[in-house]
Amino acid sequence: MSLSADGIYNFMGLKNYISDIYNGVKSLITGMKVTGHYITHPKEIVTQQYPENRDTLKMFERFRGEVVLIHDENNLHKCTGCSACELACPNGSIEIISGKEIDPETGKSTKIIDTFVYHLSMCTFCNLCILSCPTDAIKMAQGFEHSVFDRSKLTKVLNKPGSKIMPGVK
Amino acid sequence: MNFNIYDFTEFVNSIKLWLNSVLPPAAADIAGFVIIGICFLTFIVILGLSLVYIERKVCAFFQQRLGPMRVGFWGTAQTIADIIKLVFKEPLISKGSDKFLFNLAAFIVIIAPFMAIAAIPFAKGLHVLDFDIGLFFITAISSIGVTGILLAGWSSNNKYSLIGAMRSGAQIVSYELSVILSLLTIIVLTGSLQLSVIVESQRDGWWIFKGNIPAIIAFFIFIIASTAESNRGPFDMAEAESELTAGFHTEYSGIKFAFFFLAEYINLFIIAAVGATVFFGGWMPLHIGNFEFFNNVMDFIPPIIWFFGKIAAIIFLIMWFKWTFPRLRIDQLLTLEWKYLLPINLINLLLMALVALSGWHL
Amino acid sequence: MTEQELITNIETVPETQEYFINMGPQHPSTHGVLRLLLTLDGEIIKKVEPHLGYIHRSIEKMCEKDSYQQIVHLTDRMDYLSCHINNEAVCLCVENGLQLEIPERVKVIRTIISELTRLSSHQLWWGVMGMDLGAITTFLYGFRDRELITDIFEETCGARLTMNYNVPGGVMFDIHPNFQKRTKDFITYFRKKLPEYDELLTGNVIFTERTKDIGYLSKEDAISYGVTGPSGRASGFACDVRKRFPYSAYDRVEFKEIIYTEGDCFARYKARIDEMWESMKIIEQLIDNIPEGEHKAKTKAVIKLPEGEYYQRVETARGELGVYIVSDNKKSPYRVKFRSPGFSNLSALDTMARGNKIADLVATMSTLDLVIPDIDR
Amino acid sequence: MDNEKLKNIVTSVIPECEFSPDESQFLNVIVKPEDFRKLAEFLRYDPETQMDYLFCMTAIDWNTHFFTIYHLTSSVTNFTVVIKVKITDRETPNIDTVCDIWKTAEFHEREVYDLFGIKFNNHPDLRRILLEDDWVGYPLRKDYKDEVNIVEL
């Protein structure tokens, strides 16, 4: 064994051995302090109890939950049936079945929507249909509770029965 | 019948006398066994359920969560619901497994803590087996459990289980040494393995305070080693969820899985009970020298509450470890034992002998 | 027993054998449906053979049918933890092809959200890494902090994970009025919480024992295997695309390229932790200086890229993502190739894990930060 | 190093290579499959080029022929070159492997084999990587038909 000062203090590596233990225990206690802090501060708990807080739970206005066709109080919507959204959709989750309506005043036939079919099961909520809509007839709503027992319920018809296109929207 | 919360001796004796008076001696003995057995079964089930609940809650609070909240008030009935689910689950046995050993393993695992719990003194006079090798009996019996783990891993016909079982074997063989040596450190002072004597010797103060520095070191080694022995995190190599999916009990389902689960928690209880008995005076209240008033106030708290309070504190400490630290690797686990704990333990034992000889302890 | 019999008896003692274990496709630490076929000798790994494709969705084939706007949302589903950066890569590539001048505001917004994405990805990685090593509490802490970022995303972009906030030419909406305040609040909060990560895991003696000198990858191997991102930089491979080929607003911010030379799990861990500090620095430099202007350049409804080939590389949270678009002047690309970082990073796993134990493989895998949909595409 | 110099270097190794138009992003070199291996080895080990990082490798089906495309860069000089190998044989397309030069090519070549059916000679472990082993056809080829899985919108 060398007689250097280090050699004496570090007798047979004993110093390293002890400092290993000391540093190890110290690091463990540092870790325990962090968890210890949180168990003594129950006010910092971040859990949200979901179904219970349903009333107070408000989604952000931009949150994309499902596509809806906007109807006003007179059951009028703005969809002209141009099927721009159908083309923009990457997954084919929008199907527009259009019909013809003859304007009683001018006698011209105009294209209107018959049914606006929305397959929620195929939608990826990419927002492209909303961007492509020239008349802002559709928007993303905040509803997110989509689970159903029957898959066919996910195929929705967005235009309400008896709804009409808003006058003046082309 | 004379029920006294501070001393159960008379109460237990009166039951014995009553049994002997209504039954022939042999039948009275058998009836006594049955009563004790039923008591312990109920106790263990309640204990297991409540410990699972406590663990989940404690873990949740460490992690800034709420834990189970749905079933019952604050989720108190959650574990009962879990047990009901486990009982009704199909007990699957995987193809190619050794069916006999597979079933046997679950029972061995649960029997070991059942036997060990008998020797634990709950309060004065509330003690089933009080023989002169009590501590030895507990350490010996509780290490039978590893046989069950080995069998479970071997008979499952699953390589993950096998690795887990082998790890567990290596681990328990190593850590058994440290547990016993750290307990021996205190035995040097008490001079007896009988648990009631150990408790009685701490009437004027617990060994962790009286026994000077070596006792404190011994306590921490005991906690570390016994956590490892019960296969709990950070030493849960045998289960090692992220490496071996679930280790030795990968293939178990239903009630047999519940046995493994229950055994883990009862082992936890036994460790804490032994630790409390040896280091913290068992059911003995906290007494400080000549502070008569303080000692009287402490005496007013029933011993059974003292005992369970100490156990709860130790269990909390072990849970704190589990929910803070990452898991060790198997070779590091063995390094920790053979390079650190065992040498420290041996030196500590020598120190304690020195302390005992020189009378430095209180 | 004669001597001869003894010798034959000794010879019939079975030798140790190598055996196989299937790790995955369902396994807690493969983080998805990755299957690793391990050849083991006891607990020592002799060989790791990844079997991929359990979540292959043929995104490249789908791109050949979709318009350029539609491609963007598919990239969300590759590396879902750095979805914004993936989107950005496609958009930059398309803008590059169209020679489109995008507003300064867009560049800054994209950079801020990219860095937030990187932060959230690293937070998740930190939590999962701790969980892989057995410290389950870290998982919850990581997610706790990540939640605040996803809230910012939800408010501004409209979704928490697959945001699809980019469109060719800009971003989908302008930033929400609360965006700057929320982001600043988050940075102040996270500057306090990040040291906690160090206390809980980085300094922990068990953790350092588990990660130091484990899963070593040399610089030569890192370059040869194309291991990029924090994993590559931990081996000394200076591969930060943000520095080498600055895009968006990275040319005007100051940040350090984190380089470690150890090449082990701990270096990869440290690289990511340090990267979180750098990301916060970048965000702080930009958040108050978002230039006024349009949030989107004018593009035609049907985008047709001129004939040619376009390559765009960006730095995702996992490494270098390359988007290679070959166009034949139609409304959908002729061929799209995504050079995903995870795919190349995974190929180095065998080299890194050999000779280590099963537990080390788990540590190595989690420091590589694999996202399986990114690998399989 | 600039494009001109690199062009000269490449021509000195493979005299009959083509270069793509100037306005493309990187320098594109189009070579024949039999010359490719030589060029790859040269670019990797020549002290002047040191293309040690293959950052993207893929293939394109141009109906009459395939291109396998190697994006190479150097971690030392930061210069990028794209090698395109024109494979005219559609029935049994094959090309030499480079996975001993750039290890990352091992996975990428398997992917190309999986999706395009281009065989890489001397590849140590050429199996399908993303699709199942019994998959019929090569999906990224332009003439690939799958009535079940591909829905034409």
Image (tube, coloured by chain):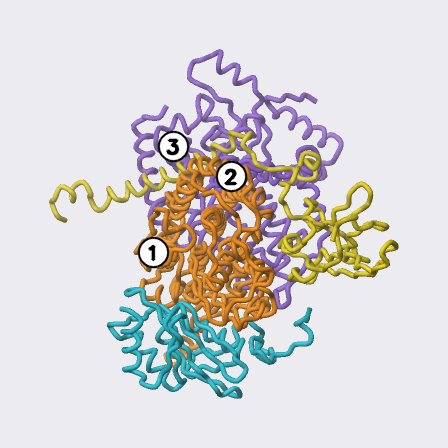
Chain colours: A yellow, B purple, C orange, D cyan
Task: Give the image quarter of residue B12.
Answer: top right
In the rendered image, is residue C342 in sight? no
The residues bearing labels 2 and 1 have C-alpha atoms spaced at a distance of 30 Å
Residue A80, image x, y percentages: 75, 55
Amino acid type, callout 3: Ala
Nearer to us: label 3 or label 1 = 1
Number of the label disc, if any, that sits on residue C213: 1
Residue C221, image x, y percentages: 34, 66
Nearer to us: label 2 or label 1 = 1
Whether callout 3 and callout 1 share a subunit is answered no
* SS at circle 3: helix
| Location of mark 3 (residue) | B215
Amino acid type, callout 2: Met
- The foreground one among B142 and B68 is B68
The residues bearing labels 3 and 2 have C-alpha atoms spaced at a distance of 22 Å
The residues bearing labels 3 and 1 have C-alpha atoms spaced at a distance of 37 Å
Query: Residue at horizontal 47%, vertical 29%?
Result: B280
Of the two numbered discs 3 and 2 on the same chain, state the one appearing first in sequence.
3
In the rendered image, is residue C3 in sight? yes
Task: Give the image quarter of residue D132.
Answer: bottom right
| Location of mark 2 (residue) | B319
